[in-house]
Image (cartoon, rainbow, N blue to C red):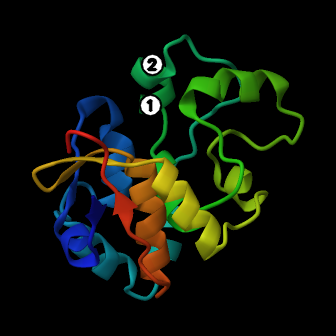
Amino acid sequence: MILTYDNFLQCELFYEPLRASHRAAVTNNHTLTTIKDIIEFYKQPGIIDKLNKEYILETDTSKPFTEPINLNKSFWATGNNYFYNCMLAEFRKGVICYKDANKYITDNTSGNMLFSRAYYNSMEIMSDIDIKEFLNQNPIGIEGNVIMHGIHRVCAMIGRLITNKEYIPFNLGKGY
């Protein structure tokens, strides 16, 4: 099953206290409800530049975090850039999964902190064909109209739509 463009625009991003600061950066401090609201807000001239200067705080990923990363308060609560940077970067080749974060941090020779703007900018942009294949292989999870799983992918798509690129449908995972 796929998520149509119109249905995508009506979706909301799951709120979870652990990731609240990262969600807040994308939803204008939780004031933007739907994906359509987010896209319209970020299409306004100067908004991204203003947030980049005044609001976005890159998480310090220079040292490994206690596992599991997905539940680590330091990993999630010391910045607000994870979802926001996905939105700015759109879809990039070679982005690592959270489960491999400490391996990247330990082996990092690039000097780019994980999930930072520099990290994404060092990666090649995915083609539409690559994105279609990636989304087919990596479904997102939705309950009602709330995106529960795959928020980073959703933020990357929001970034595409902000820059007037084509919506590429998401596959929905089993049970969603």
Q: Quadrant of residue 143?
A: top left
In the picture, the disc for residue 72 is 2
Q: Residue at x 68, y 55 (%)?
A: 120
- From the top left corner, tell me how far across and down residue 108 is, in percent: 83, 32
Q: Nearer the viewer, residue 134 or 161?
A: 134
Above or below, 80 against 51 in this view is above
Q: What amino acid type should be assigned to the residue bearing mark 1?
A: Trp
Residue 50 visible to an observer of this rendering: no
Mark 1 = which residue?
76
Number of labelled discs?
Answer: 2
In this picture, residue 173 sits left or right of residue 129: left
Task: Look at the numbered disc 2 and give the secondary structure of its residue.
Answer: loop
Q: Which quadrant holds the C terminus?
A: top left
Residue 115 % position (x, y): 62, 44
Kindly indicate the quadrant of the structure image that contains residue 91: bottom right
Q: Between residue 99 and residue 64, name the one nearer to us.
A: 99
- Compute the Cα span from label 1 to label 2: 7 Å
Q: Is residue 8 left or right of residue 135?
A: left
Work out which residue is located at the far left of the displayed protein and give it. Answer: 144
Determine the residue located farthest toward the top in the rendered image: 66
Q: Amino acid at mark 2?
A: Asn
Q: Which residue is at a point 83% across and 25% down the rendered structure image?
A: 107
Q: Residues within 10 Å of mark 2 (few under 14, many from 20)?
A: few
Residue 87 higher or lower than 22, as above or below: below
Quadrant of the image for the N terminus?
Answer: bottom left
Left or right of 116? Residue 54 is left
